[in-house]
Amino acid sequence: MVYNPAWQRGSRRPDFFLFATELPFVRRAVIAVKPWHTDVFTPAMLKSSPDIFNFLEENVLRQASRLFSAEAEATDDPEVTKVLVLPALPTTEPFRSQSVELLKGRGIDAIISFRAMMLDLVEKVEINRSYGKSDTLQMIRILKNYDLLKDTQLDLPSR
């Protein structure tokens, strides 16, 4: 579960595909992480794996609403964004569109890909800063320091 204390009243809803730039628009969320890194979430997989959607069960959402209730009452907005973190969606049509429609139809409000998260982490980690409280960030910093990981950058065509 996530609560964003920096959320601004009157903000728009986040886009379905969440990137770092969309996170300020998420106010409260229930998030499920599906780390099946060797699989692409195809329409067939989504249809045959109902456990992907377990976090959307009424008892889970009721518990989330209860935990967020004081804040929701203060702002008169009970909405909780339902986010799925997954490895990837298909890249070819019509499978990509079918997957998105299936996810939306089951109640998913937004998705985040592991690739998007990792790219954002790599970009934000600075090699001259210590991340002693996070082994993950510290490892990314060390890998970047030894040029084993590079920041993503815009490749401009050479003249």
Image (spheres, helix red, strand yellow):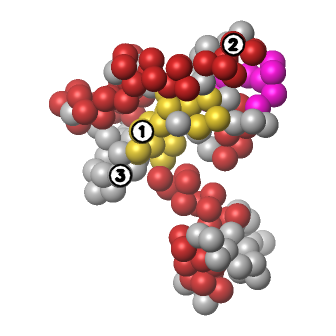
Circle 2 or circle 1, nearest the eye: 2
- Residue 87 position within the rendered picture, expressed as x and y whole percent measured from the top left: 39, 50
Secondary-structure class at tag 1: strand
- Residue 33 position within the rendered picture, expressed as x and y whole percent measured from the top left: 41, 44
Outermost top residue: 76
Give the quadrant of residue 6.
top right
Outermost bottom residue: 146
- Disc number placed over residue 32 in the picture, else none: 1
As measured in the structure, the alpha-carbon distance from the residue carrying label 2 to the one carrying label 3 is 34 Å
**Residue 111 visible within the image:** no
Which residue lies at the image location 30% right of the left edge and 34% below the top edge? 52
Residue linked to disc 3: 35
Q: Would you say 159 lies left or right of 61 here?
A: right
Identify the magenta region. 7-16
**Mark 2 / mark 1, whichever is N-terminal:** 1
Which residue lies at the image location 67% right of the left edge and 74% below the top edge? 131
- Residue 122 position within the rendered picture, expressed as x and y whole percent measured from the top left: 62, 67
Residue linked to disc 2: 73
Which residue lies at the image location 69% right of the left edge and 36% below the top edge? 4
> Mark 1, residues whose alpha carbon is within 10 Å: few (<14), some, or many (≥20)?
some
Q: Amino acid at mark 2?
A: Glu
Secondary-structure class at tag 2: helix
As measured in the structure, the alpha-carbon distance from the residue carrying label 2 to the one carrying label 1 is 25 Å
Q: Amino acid at mark 3?
A: Pro
Q: Would you say 131 lies left or right of 61 here?
A: right
